[in-house]
Amino acid sequence: MRDKEQTKRKLINAVAQVFKNEGYAGLGVNKIARLAGTDKKLIYRYFGTFEGLVEAYVVETDYWMRFADQLNELRVPEGMEEMKRLLGYILKNQFLYFYEDKEMQQLIFWELAAKSDLMRSIHQTREVKGQQLLEMTDHYLEKGKVNFRAIAALLVGGIYYMILHTRNNGSMFSDIDLSKPDGRQDILNAIDAILDMTFKLSNGSTVDDIAQ
């Protein structure tokens, strides 16, 4: 059993190494087996298919997949403030994780740049996991003047685009330098502010009330 787990780990690590250096186009059965120092038959024995091996790597790397296990253990927050803090924690950590993790950036770029049954499946799984979190917010936000799912889409999508753009085209975005700690803190503060306004709107406040 130990040998099996060690071999699986070597194979997943080999996928990580190739993906990090060459992207998805560099992945291949023979290359991965050679890099892992194993027979390629073990890929099929332990993962079913080569895509199954790549999926195992993606599940370990993707922020939302990694968070999903924790999400299953979370209790529904008691009160709006606790719910708001939880959402802030999740979204701000997504920003920081995605900013630092080059492999996660590659995964999202791959998802956007090429049609792939595997990445389509990963995206759908990510949506299912995200739905668990969104359903937690319904008790507090479903009667709000703005659909929170739309706000979440803008925040998550904005985080992905902003970081991918600055990683490939320079560190400035909307006059904010994401390469500087102060710039990244501005984004974290903005996430808190957006969530604060969202919860106030769901609690009966109007835009005019918030602006005062």
Image (cartoon, grey):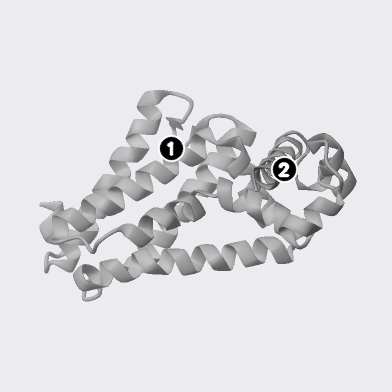
Q: Which residue is mark 1?
A: 96
Q: Residue at x 80, y 51 (%)?
A: 42
| Quadrant of residue 207 within the rendered picture | bottom left
Q: Which mark is residue 7?
A: 2
- Mark 1 vs mark 2, foreground winner is 2
State the image coordinates of residue 156 (x, y, percent, origin top left). Answer: 45, 54
> Would you place residue 26 above or below residue 134 in this image?
above
Which element type, helix, strand or loop, lies under badge 1?
helix
Q: Position of residue 172 (x, y in %)?
A: 51, 31
Position in image of residue 187 (x %, y %):
36, 39
Residue 51 falls left or right of residue 69: right
Secondary element at tag 2: helix
Marks 1 and 2, how far apart at CA: 31 Å
Type of amino acid at the residue the image marks with label 2: Thr
- Quarter where residue 78 is shown: bottom left
The front one of 171 and 47 is: 47
Instruction: Bin the neighbour count of mark 1 within 10 Å (Cα to Cα): few under 14, some 14-19, many 20 and up.
Output: some
Residue 7 in view, yes or no? yes
